[in-house]
Amino acid sequence: MIVGTAGHIDHGKTSLVRVLTGVDTDRLKEEKERGISIDLGFAYLPTPNGSIIGFIDVPGHERFVHTMVAGASGIDFVVLVVAADDGVMPQTLEHLAIVEMLGIRRGVVALTKADLAAPTRRDEVTSEISSVLSGTGLDGAPVIPVSSVTGDGIEELLQQLFAAAHAFGRRATRGRFRLAVDRSFTLAGAGTVVTGTVLSGQVAVGDRVVVSPPGLAARVRSIHAQNRPAEHGHAGERCALNLVGEGITKDAIRRGDMAVDPELHAPADRIDAVVRLLPSETRPISQWMPVRLHHAAADIGARVVLLEDEALAPGTSKRVQLVLERPIAAAVGDRFVLRDTTAQRTIGGGHLLDLRAPSRKRRTAVRMAQLDALSIEEPGQALAALLDREPHYVDLSGFARDHALAEDEMAHIVGELSVIRIAAKNHVLGLSPATYLRLRRAVASILQAFHQDNPDLPGMGMERLRLQLDPRLPALAFASALQGMARAGEVALDGAWVKLAGHEVRLTPQDERLWERMVPLLGASERFRPPRVRDIEGLLNVPEREIRRLSKLLARVGKVDEVAHDHFFLRNTVAEMVQIAASLAAAEKKGEFTAAQFRDRVNNGRKVAIQILEFFDRHGVTLRRGDLRRMNKHRLDLFRMSSNSVGPSNSDQGREAPPVGRPDFKSGRGREPVLGGFDSHSLPPRLGHA
Ligand SMILES: Nc1nc2c(ncn2[C@@H]2O[C@H](COP(=O)(O)OP(=O)(O)OP(=O)(O)O)[C@@H](O)[C@H]2O)c(=O)[nH]1
Ligand SMILES: [Mg+2]
């Protein structure tokens, strides 16, 4: 447990820590000279059951409130110090407000300098204290009169602290590692050391961390936890980390930085949050008002964008967007304090909702619904709620990172909710099973309608399909989702075309008859030199454009290939010619053959033979070097023999080439819709088309 002091200047905070722990935390020369605390002080106290309480002593001076916030950000328990002679003073109230904003609900009040106040005065101050605590998280906290001079009450306070530490136990070691740096210094023989409170997760000697926001990578060479050498540091402990790495120096790391699990390094500078304005404020927070944001040990200039219609009035809470002067390392749910820009008053505080807040459409109903979901504290429930709202998909990698969730925690949540994961480039999108089912049904029905209206087209353009769907997934994710549906046998993909599995291009009865008359002309002994469109017109007495139209249609479905303009070959013939070229190449020592060799084998004249080879060149089936060609072994089956059913076409004659930069479906990333490290659920069983 980490205990922090709080209270007005000169009320005896440091003296109290000294009698409790034996450590004088006012170490600075200036602190000695002026008799006040300036910086944070740290001390440790072993408890009877063997655990160690860490103390953070804070300055009370009104000019050092920012330091007080930095110290209070990591504490579990507060000792609010009120001098019995002075009573409640301005920084008593301000520190109390800060403790409240930081969500600290455990604590005691030490009524210090009890030796200087008569019993009636003590009673007076005690009732003053109960009235200021009323309605706060510390409402009803015990008030213990103590004197650091006579030692009165110290034993009772100690017992209270031990009991609290015992009841508190250990902070749950949830989440990925985050340590809020409050000091960075050089230690002779060790190098750079940073100290701070572990906010979440744990760290072990040898671990890699990143100092964020600067982005400095480091290795943890050694650890002190609660002032003792340790192999591990856990959430809720004060730790000193000896860091080594390029660029790691005491000056490169500042109070306010975080040492985090490398996965978490993603500084944020536009953050949606809930803010409560203190009732003591006299004016509401106005649009674009400048404030000072105190988060963990950092403080940064920021502007407030109001997200709700009504003004943010004193004593109320509202959603706002914080636009920061520079990014911070944070996590969803983190508490913060707002002070005015002249650093004279604490004006409010709150907690963070979304680290990747949008700069546009930030006040829409859709956005508010998302923020409702993000307001849910329990991450699993928040994710479930998000998946349920527009846009109906969630960047799971970003969600896990911004909630500082450990891999197994995220895997558990994803498993519990049966989230469907879709890989897209560097992240993984999640859909609820219901949304995914809806998507698949919509894909099926849109394709069905499309095939009905366009029986002669092999499929629908992937982009056109994507734009008709809700949710409209990002293009890469959509391609991955279709891959999943293709694996489940629901759809078939051919480059940028999507069709229902089992869809075949149907010819009209007239086309069917014409095709039956064309086949013998294209096949048979003249197959390597089939008649051109115009020749067929003469042979069959059918208009040239009809022959051309049907030929192009059949080319799209892979029945024929347009080797040269208006010159269509049967797909089987093209496949046969690839074999011939391959056998020529195989017979040559260097694997290269000439156009003349090819012509002699197919015996169709020099001009046509060269047109065929150039067609192969264009498709990368052959690789030409001067007069010689060799085979491209990766493309040997580009023109597979077509079966009875109409197979996918690989000819690009008469159809669009696949768009450049389309997702590589063959890469492992696109194939498995699984977030790195998560257990590998596959997509759910196929959707019936009934
Ligand atoms: N008589 C008496 N004097 C005390 C007691 N506690 C502290 N003092 C005196 O009060 C003065 C201030 O004490 P500190 O402990 O430095 O006060 P502080 O709250 O740490 O002050 P800042 O850190 O500057 O806010 C010192 O001169 C102490 O000796 C007490 O219980 N009785
Ligand atoms: Mg002090």
Image (cartoon, rainbow, N blue to C red):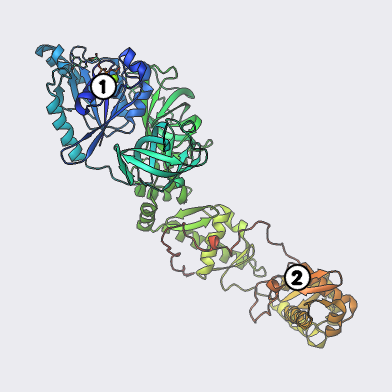
Disc 1 CB within 8 Å of nearest ligand 2 atom:
yes
Whole-percent x, y for residue 544 in the image: 84, 73
Residue 601 location, quadrant: bottom right
Which residue ends up furthest to the front in the rendered image?
A: 189
Nearer-the-camera pick, 268 or 468: 268
Nearer-the-camera pick, 633 or 684: 633
For residue 279, side relative to residue 260 (left or right): left
Q: Mark 1 belongs to which amino acid?
A: Thr
Nearer-the-camera pick, 210 or 645: 210
Whole-percent x, y for residue 190 in the image: 41, 38
Residues under numbered marks 1 and 2 in contact, where contact means CB atoms less than 8 Å apart = no
- Ligand 2, seen in the image, is in the quarter at top left
Checking the image for residue 50, the label placed there is: none
Q: Nearer the viewer, mark 1 or mark 2?
A: 1
Q: Mark 2 belongs to which amino acid?
A: Lys
Whole-percent x, y for residue 396 in the image: 45, 51
Query: Can you identify the residue that label 1 sits on?
Result: 14
Which residue ends up furthest to the bottom in the rendered image?
A: 525
Residue 547 location, quadrant: bottom right
Placement of 302 over or under 574, stated as above or below: above
Checking the image for residue 552, the label placed there is: 2
